[in-house]
């Protein structure tokens, strides 16, 4: 959408487009050996790892960000894992959580997208968090490697981008 930056009708000055999508932060946890996060918290989210599964960034003036998360996950029969983000300082959930149906004997690579709107501009640190729907266990895996190492490996990746500006 083009917006006039002045009231004049001749030689109209156009406002700069509200561009979004710039990368604000990338966090990757890729240890040399497999790290397994066993998720057992029922009905709520608990931080996975406040050291390695966390991301810090500056919330833009719009207050909107889009976060992409990728990791390998598996869960037992009847267990539905979900994940989302907790404020690193307060522990409060930020935004919605996403549930994933990943009941499998092997881990599955999942990629989910979170849109967080109305955040307070400034510094923010979020911890990746997860939970399950019923008593049981889901596993989230992190590992960095070259070549092919088997069905569970892969880095845990979080990418934060500037979100679209609401009009």
Image (cartoon, rainbow, N blue to C red):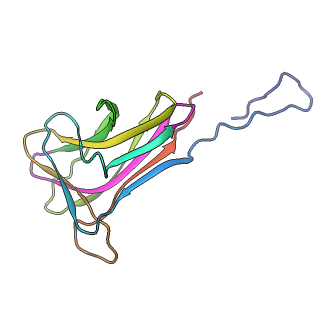
Q: Residue at x 39, y 46 (%)?
A: 55
Give above or below for 152 relative to 78.
Answer: below
Residue at the left extreme, as displayed: 135
Give above or below for 62 relative to 20.
Answer: above
| Magenta stretch encompasses residue 73 | yes
Location of residue 110 in the rendering, given as x and y in whole percent from the top left corner:
30, 54
Is 128 positioned to the left or the right of 1 in the image?
left
Magenta residues (range): 59-79
- Count of numbered circles on the image: 0
Location of residue 3 in the rendering, given as x and y in whole percent from the top left corner:
74, 30
Q: Residue at x 89, y 25 (%)?
A: 9
Residue at the top extreme, as displayed: 7
Is 152 positioned to the left or the right of 156 in the image?
left
Q: Residue at x 30, y 29 (%)?
A: 92
Q: Nearer the viewer, residue 130 or 54?
A: 54
- The quarter in which the C terminus is drawn is top right
Q: Residue 151 is drawn in which quadrant?
A: bottom left
| Magenta stretch encompasses residue 68 | yes
Location of residue 99 in the rendering, given as x and y in whole percent from the top left corner:
25, 42
Residue at the bottom extreme, as displayed: 147
Q: Residue at x 69, y 38 (%)?
A: 17
Give above or below for 14 relative to 48.
Answer: above
- The quarter in which the N terminus is drawn is top right
Location of residue 109 in the rendering, given as x and y in whole percent from the top left corner:
29, 59
Give above or below for 111 relative to 163.
Answer: below
């Amino acid at each position: 959408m083009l917006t006039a930056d002045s009231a004049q009708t001749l030689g109209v000055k156009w406002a700069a487009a509200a561009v979004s999508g710039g990368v604000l932060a990338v966090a990757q946890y890729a240890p040399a050996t497999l790290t397994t996060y066993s998720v057992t918290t029922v009905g709520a989210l608990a931080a996975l790892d406040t050291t390695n599964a966390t991301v810090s960034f500056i919330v833009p003036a719009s207050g909107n960000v889009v976060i992409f998360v990728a990791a390998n996950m598996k869960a037992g029969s009847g267990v539905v894992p979900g994940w989302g983000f907790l404020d690193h300082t307060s522990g409060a959930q930020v935004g919605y959580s996403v549930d994933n149906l990943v009941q499998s004997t092997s881990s599955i690579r999942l990629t989910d997208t979170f849109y967080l709107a109305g955040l307070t501009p400034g510094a923010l640190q979020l911890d990746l968090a997860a939970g399950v729907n019923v008593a049981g266990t889901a596993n989230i895996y992190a590992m960095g490697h070259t070549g092919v190492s088997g069905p569970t490996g892969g880095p845990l990746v979080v990418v934060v981008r500037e979100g679209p500006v609401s009009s």
